[in-house]
Image (tube, helix red, strand yellow):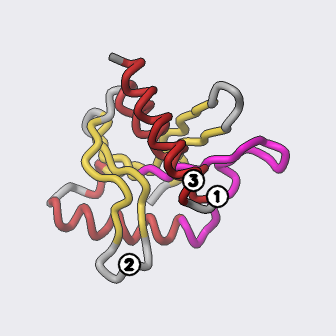
Amino acid sequence: MQWAATFFDWLRHRARVRQWEPNLTLGRRGEDLAHRFLRRQGYIIVARNYRLAAGDAEVDIIGWDGDALAFVEVKSRSNEDFGPPDRAIDARKRSHMLRVAREYTRKSNTPWERVRFDVVAVVMRKRPEVRLLKGEWAA
């Protein structure tokens, strides 16, 4: 069954390449790979590309990892010439994720103590490399 999911991911990616800008295609492919990777790690995904009502802040993936609610930023790069993908997360992005987490936990009645911020770094080599960095920063 894993081969079917991989095949359909590839088909989706090929369609996007024809229609989207290259950087958007790379980012969405990375998010698809991260989503599948997190599910294999046992995460229960509850939302993808969750945005605030104002539309000015977004989190790539929200999922339960055991009793922790993880807000996950996915960073994808075609190579690591300028460092690992996760180094591209700046204070502004962390602030946006924090705002989204506050709203989401309020709406879902999730205790703040259960919140964690994770990063998935994806490097698009011949065979993509996916790394999970749990608890990358504190709220």
Q: The C terminus lies in which quarter of the figure? A: bottom left
Q: Which residue is mark 2?
A: 55
Type of amino acid under label 1 = Asn
The crowd level at tag 3 (other Cα within 10 Å; few <14, some 14-19, many 20+) is few
Residue range in magenta is: 72-93
Q: CA distance from mark 1 to mark 2?
A: 20 Å
Q: Which mark is residue 14?
A: none
From the viewer's perspective, tell me whether residue 113 is left or right of residue 120: left
Q: Is residue 6 above or below residue 91?
A: above
Q: 50 or 28: which is nearer to us?
A: 28
Q: Looking at the image, which residue is at 34% across and 50% down?
A: 62
Q: Which residue is mark 3?
A: 18
Residue 80 percent across, percent down from the top left: 78, 42
Q: Which residue is mark 1?
A: 23
Q: CA distance from mark 3 to mark 1?
A: 13 Å
The residue tagged with tag 2: helix, strand or loop?
loop
